[in-house]
Amino acid sequence: MDALTGGALTGAWELHPSVSLRPEPFGALAYHFGNRRLTFLRHPDVVSVVRALADHPTVDAALGACEVDERRWPSFHRALATLAASEMIRPRTSAGDDEPVQEAC
Amino acid sequence: MSTELMSETVETEPRTDDAVDEASGDLVVEELLVEEISIDGMCGVY
Amino acid sequence: MGIDVKAPVGRVTKTPALVDQMKAGLDAPICLTWELTYACNLACVHCLSSSGRRDPRELTTEECLGVVDQLRDLQVFYVNIGGGEPMLRRDFEDIVEYATTHQVGVKFSTNGTYLDAAAARRFAAMDYLDIQISIDGATPDVNDAVRGEGSFAAAVTAMENLAEADFGPFKISLVVTRHNVSQLDQYLGLADRYGAQLRVTRLRPAGRGADTWHELHPTQAQQRDLYHWLMDRPHVLTGDSFFHLSAFGEALPGLNLCGAGRVVCLIDPVGDVYACPFVIHDEFRAGSVRDDGGFAEVWKRSELFRSLREPSSPGACASCGSYDACQGGCMAAKFFVGLELDDPDPECVKGHAEPLLTAVVPGAAPVPSPDHTRPGAVQVALGATRRG
């Protein structure tokens, strides 16, 4: 069973503003107040990447900034596609993307 | 803290934080990094 | 589509690590039940909180808002507000409004008596609010036999008011008993008629339920029917309260996990914190929101919750092949019928509790405490519609 129906997520993304992200020892819980869905983020690295999305122009840029080993990227792409499907993350449309922010994760 | 990594197709031994085999450098397992849980699926959660 | 533990491939396969995380306890509850008052206009025979009379030590409005602040700080996602009848508190809507505007979602359970058209419109205008109407039968005779004369009509009126006010989807919740299990399809029809989601939940021998449990709980045959009915209808909510039935075969959807003290807990009207709403008894009291450190301290460091987060031994269930599926059942059910916590569930579908139950000395089972039943409250007579 694969969460991807197409290619990887393109463009800029961000945590949905209706989502409460709550740290836990294993990673985090994410609860979407709008659709009432609950998701476990099962590794601290996923949490870091999700938080970093808003500061980077693409998913892969966020992965890079968080120093996620590239060989793990497919798993992260799947995870983010799952989050997109449940609206935990959403495409970012704000201006300011023309200057990529090379921030650390 | 070790993470238990599971996927439908590969082994499910506990791994360290890296899903990468130290020796060969290959990706050893796919990681299930997010999991949706039904709010209705835990006793006591209304 | 997401990776969903309820998907067919994963239905039998749990994800051990995730369940283990839950069993070890979370940093904060996902949600919790908050009984706002013990006052109630009804006197349902199986009331889990023995409600009726208001307790004079109830949390004040200010204390209640303070609890909401604490929940927000902990990032508790939402609360299930109940009672008694929560709408009997004059500050009920103020508390709900405060919560939903301060990052704490609200779902409240009500018998509907006070949910008039105007209230329905006010609720329809609020965000992050879910409503659940309690109704224990698909017809007045079956419902009123446990909830009192007129209670069915009051509940249906509330449902009509919600529909009229365009509230949107709400829930109706049924406690399954020996006498209403035959009405499940009709009950589903009732839910469909009002655009509501159906929730069915397990009767525990808690509160006034302790007095009537032996007469009210479903028979083994009915449990089997219920199991199959639920398996065929994954859209019916159960709150995972029937995980003991998973021992019948394929596991019911859900984590089949007791969340008490680990994922959820109860705050009662006087601020006492219990492991769950079905164990209102000193044995399962973890502390009080009025203690130093408030709710957070109780959740994170109370002795009771720490012990609930330790791995538990299967005890008598160790040799049974179904333990993985049923986890030994419900702590509250065992406790209030006088079994030990590592005994089988009193409704163990394999009958492993039968010999133990007959050995329980009458009167030896723990008494739910405290009892808020109104003196002289009409005790609904079960005999009227009892069948067999």
Image: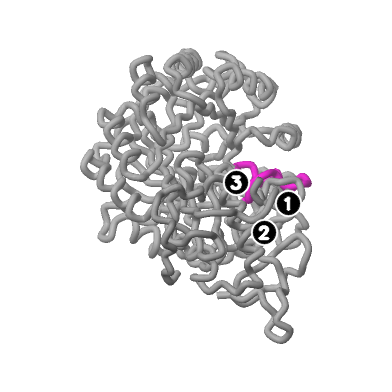
* Mark 1 secondary-structure assignment: helix
- Residue C255: x %, y % from top left: 63, 51
Is C12 situated above or below C197?
below
Badge 3: chain ID = A
* Of the image marks 2 and 1, the number of the one nearer the N terminus: 1
Q: Residue beneath label 2, please?
A: C15
Identity of the amino acid at label 1?
Gly
Q: Is residue C35 left or right of residue A59?
A: left
> Which quadrant holds the N terminus of chain C?
top right
Task: Decide which of C88, C170 is in the foreground and name it.
Answer: C170
Residue C187's quadrant in the figure? top right
Badge 1: chain ID = C
| Magenta span includes C255 | yes
Identity of the amino acid at label 3?
Ala
Q: Residue beneath label 1, please?
A: C10
Asked if the residue under mark 1 is in contact with the one under mark 2, i.e. CB atoms within 8 Å, the reply is yes
Is C168 situated above or below A11?
above
Task: Decide which of C305, A1 is in the foreground and name it.
Answer: A1
Q: Residue beneath label 3, please?
A: A85
Badge 2: chain ID = C
Tell me, for residue A67, which label it has, or none.
none
Q: Nearer the viewer, mark 2 or mark 3?
A: 3
Mark 3 crowd level (few <14, some 14–19, many ≥20, 10 Å Cα): some
* Mark 2 secondary-structure assignment: loop
Report how far apart the C-alphas of labels 2 and 1 lie in the structure. Answer: 9 Å
Residues shaded magenta: C240-256
Q: Nearer the viewer, mark 1 or mark 3?
A: 3
Q: Is residue A84 left or right of residue C183?
A: left
Asked if the residue under mark 3 is in contact with the one under mark 1, i.e. CB atoms within 8 Å, the reply is no
